[in-house]
Amino acid sequence: MKTRLTWSIIFLLPTVYIAMHSMLNLPTPQIVGELFDGRENAVTFAFAQFLLILPIMYLNRRYYVNGFKNLFRGAPNMDTLVGLGSMAAAVFGAFSLFRIGYGLGHGDLLLVDEYAQNLYFESAGMIVTLITVGKYFEARAKGKTTQAVKALMNLAPKTASVIRDGVEVQISVDELAKGDEVAVRPGESFAADGIIFEGETTVDESAITGESLPVNKTVGDKVTSGTINRGGFVKFRAVHVGEESTIQKIIALVEEASASKAPIAKLADKIAGVFVPAVICIAIAAGSFWLMNGATVEFAFSIAISILVISCPCALGLATPVAIMVGTGKGAENGILIKSGEALQTAHEVNTVVVDKTGTLTEGKPFVTDIITFDVDADELVKIAAGLESKSEHPLAKAVTNYAAEKNLTPLEVKNFKAIFGKGLTGDGYLCGSEKFFIERGFNLDEVHEKISALADEGKTTILFAQDRRLLGIIAVADVEKKSSIDAVAEFKNLGLDVVMVTGDNYGAAKKISARCGIENFVAEVLPEGKAAEIEKLQRGGKKVAMIGDGVNDAPALVKADLGVAIGAGTDVAVESADAVLVKNNLLDAVSAIKLSRAVMRNIKQNLFWAFFYNVICIPVAAGIFYPTFGLKLSPMIGAAAMSCSSICVVLNALRLKFFSVERAENTAAEKISAQVHSENISLQNIEEDLQTMKTTLKIEGMMCPKCQKHVHDALAKMDGVTDVEVSLENKNAVVTSDKEISTADFKKVIDDAGYELVA
């Protein structure tokens, strides 16, 4: 498309210069005047333009081929309008060339003047070139859905360590057979669905379930292909391999949904379907009228051709792509990356929004939500908890230690630390862990069981703490909803959209989060294919659906939906599968995307009006209505002016989209801190520290295992001004909190020195 456009412009520029240099008083070298100016050079003047437009017409032949095919089928479209107008201009130019030759040969200089001033060759080339400009902008905006499938394939391991005759052998995943015994080390992915028969570990299943908390696995537990072993060394027996495995099924779903997504109907084609037959009828009627009223065949023919030429609005090819180009640019300014013009057009038709829970509505990581104490105060319990949990790498432990740091509480120093896998921790007479672990240790929890159950019903995970045989308290941890999620749901409803939450999490957690976010409809405990099925069910009910998600498990649903929107901090697969990406991880930006789409569509409709307006009012002139009274007949100057005016109006109208403003319903940082002052009574010093805190998200390539994760963490933590670092192996990024601004160059140097690559 770029090559076609470039060569079209190269041939068009000299054509326009030769045709218009006298009319526009352009600087004219002597050789140009000697070759093309004056009656004696009329044939050279016309023939040079004819030769120059031939390559343009050949390069853009698809408009003529497709346009006339559709015309003969009785279904004219935009290509018909372009092809018919351009071909009519070229045919009339060729006819004029013969008439000029005839006039010169027979001494009829008035005939030469008439046709030399009424050539349309430049219009023939201009029409198809301007339409190609629009097509080029449109093509640039289109996304590549195949990248989603590639990202999914990269997620699945290429090899597996299989036990054959007691020996561990590396084989391709394609060679894996049902019943094979497979060894998996920490940091490696499971190559198939199966059942563990040796060892115990924790598994990151976020790629499949979307849930952030690792799951403990031991002998007899099922494992899923594409999930990551985060803990110990295990062996599992393959049950579902190849195309039967979960990860391959997700790939198949994405491919199927990509292939089945129907392209949006072009509004310009619909208009052309009515406009083209109408113009043809007007041209035939006008030509026939003049013939029946005594005009020459030549005059009647020129009238008919003039109508066809002037009725082809060049601006129609710019009306949609220019508005989309400005709209996508405005979206990018506000952290909304829209991958295609179709996506921007589709967004305005959406009437139902389906939202994933973890990482989309919620923060995607655990936070301390409740502290229940018995024989100690809350601060003392947090110090003890942080002392124990600081020795653990579990995400729940991280939530407790982060909470202690936020409260400026120094963790209790605990010695003789011991971790009991999947159950709890001990050290210096202190004990922490699950309810089951405490019961196994002989604790009577009858008095607190009701509280634990109530917290579990809210989707919260409880950690119990004790000293010797004395129960100290309970800390509840859960993923919490973002402030922007509550505001976004309210904004969606204000726009008249239905909101549905779909999650792989349990029913209790889903119910609480949906209630707090103001969502009445939700579906819980669904696998990736279940999410896609829910989208399909809504579509069968006549809904136009937008899906917003962030995980691999959301990929099939993102592609299946009419509009897929990915959270920017989500997995590469989700980002590649989506039609739009919210860079700032803010659900309110999805609201802005819908509003922007509606503004762009309004603008496109206005552009289509201006694309036709000037040209349509010239049709009566072209038909010769004013010729008997005023002697007024269409000239190339009028045609060129009409085309220019319509194109200028379209571009200027599209540029108004730059004034589109994104409204925020979120509190500012200062307002949030002010609210904290009233609720938590923090000191002025803490407020100043919070205001000075800066967070930077770094996209890092090259991290392959937990050791890489730790290496990157330690390198960033040593930087001057850095107060906290969170490194995600899954998302391949690091979130750095600092008390001063750190340049990208400084981050890049540290990452490069550590042996990794800073992408963004």
Image (tube, rainbow, N blue to C red):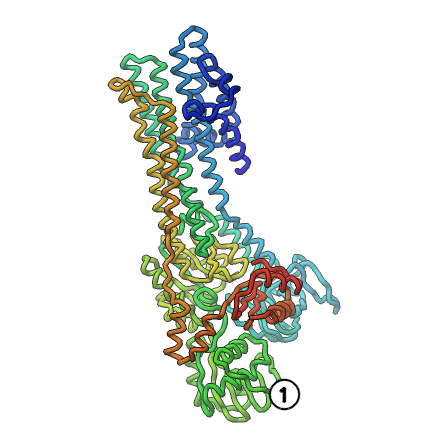
Quarter of the image with the C terminus in it: bottom right
Left or right, 539 with respect to 226, comes to left
Q: For the view shown, which residue lies furthest in the left direction?
A: 629
Residue 546 visible in the shown view: yes
Q: Quadrant of residue 448?
A: bottom left
Q: Within 10 angstroms of label 1, few (less than 14), some, or many (20 or more) residues?
A: few
Which residue is under mark 1? 416
Residue located at (38% from left, 79% from top): 679
Instruction: Classify 321 as above or below 331.
Output: above
Residue 552 drawn at (x, y percent): 53, 61
Q: Is residue 560 visible?
A: no
Q: Quadrant of residue 164?
A: bottom right
Name which residue lies at 47% across and 86% down: 379
Secondary structure at badge 1 equals loop
Q: Position of residue 545 (x, y in %)?
A: 40, 55
Residue at 36% x, 43% y is: 653
- Total numbered circles: 1
Q: Horizontally, is 532 left or right of 544 in the view?
A: right
Foreground of the two, 759 or 61: 759
Residue 534 screen position, x and y as percent? 43, 59
Q: From the viewer's side, name the closer residue of 402 and 202.
A: 402
Given residues 462 and 724, the one toward you in this image is 724
| Position of residue 220 measured from the top left corner of the image (x, y, whole percent) | 60, 74
Asked if residue 299 lies left or right of residue 702, the reply is left
Q: Residue 252 falls in which quadrant of the image?
A: bottom right
Is residue 111 left or right of 469 when viewed as pictured?
left
Q: Amino acid at mark 1?
A: Asn
